[in-house]
Amino acid sequence: MNILITGSAGFIGGHLVRRLLEQGHHVTGVDNYIGGQPATTERLRHPRFQFTEADVRVALPYSGPRLDWVLHLASLASPAHYQRFPLETLQVNAQGTQQALELAAQHGATFLLASSSEVYGDPLAHPQREDDRGHVSCTGPRSCYDEAKRYAEALTMAYHRTRGAETRIVRIFNTYGPHMRPDDGRVVTTFVQQALRGEPLTVYGDGEQTRSFQYVDDLIDGLLRLMAVPYHGPVNLGNPEEVTVLELARLVGDLVGSPPQLEYRPLPPDDPRRRQPDITLARRLLDWVPRIGLREGLERLLAEERASGGGRHAAS
């Protein structure tokens, strides 16, 4: 197939491009490097991969053969980054999503939106199902991302309902793996970088808040399965193995080989207390469950970081 991916130089985008190329597809990547990394584009050099540096908030240039898919992954996803660029985050999920939907419509291509578990906000229901309407602040510091993803979902469904667009929506839960930015700022990257440097691990709040961490290979498998199924509503993709931040810190310390020292800081505003996906729909619709547990995934990540000299650069 002929596939265009926005956000191709991002963490998830880079892994998805790699898998699609392995399957024999032709891929066009688009990124403006606000969140993506030029090193990711360099790793993806391939005869069937073309890259365009462009800002999808303004335009989505493409003049190649007819597209089969437009996959919209462009967006900052780390709280440290999207709070630094709130307007850009809102715009890439508003104007950028519309640009991508219009391009898909021009080519008769299927459109996939990479949404987020952040549409649930600080959820009242647990675990989170796709019919949960969320508990989200529309004015808090995280609203630039949370509300942007909610709008992007609404826009995608409007194109499907009013224009008959063939669409998919995936709600991605906390995902980690090789090639994340060292300054990503999210907890897995931060803990791994700090542990490898022998520094205290930064814990926000009391550390009893929970997350559910999925290894990136499992996510990519789920995305590819969703592309093969004509389902237009949102689908959760995440690992339902729920752990506290303190449990994650202890596990990282155990794998590094030294008990972690913890440095506590105040919990940021609107930080969700619990996060766990209900993946009943993904099991039924996609025959998908994550295969890689947290310990195995962290072992893979640590091996990659050590091989690449990770831990030498500070995480912000």
Image (cartoon, helix red, strand yellow):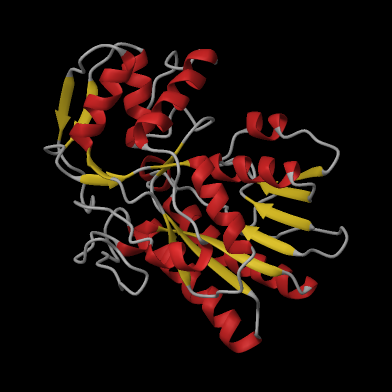
Residue 218 in view: yes
Along the horizontal axis of the image, is 288 left or right of 23? Answer: left
Q: How many marks?
A: 0
Q: Nearer the viewer, residue 193 or 36?
A: 193
Q: Quadrant of residue 302?
A: top left
| Front-most of residues 97 and 166 | 166
The residue at the point 23 percent across, 62 percent down is 123
Outermost residue, left side = 206
Residue 184's image quarter? top left
The residue lying at 32 percent from left, 17 percent from top is 195
Residue 204: horizontal and vertical position, in percent? 19, 36
**In the displayed structure, does residue 196 sit left or right of residue 136?**
right
* Camera-nearest residue between 296 and 231: 296
Image quadrant where residue 150 sits: bottom left
Relative image position of residue 211 (x, y in whole percent) = 28, 46
Q: Is residue 41 left or right of residue 199?
A: right
The residue lying at 62 percent from left, 46 percent from top is: 16
Horizontal and vertical percent position of residue 14: 62, 40
Q: Is residue 53 visible?
A: no
Q: Quadrant of the C terminus?
A: top left
Q: Quadrant of the N terminus?
A: bottom right
| Residue shown at 26% from the left, 26% from the top | 251
The spot of residue 244 in percent (x, y) is 20, 40
Residue 303 sits above or below residue 91 on the image: above
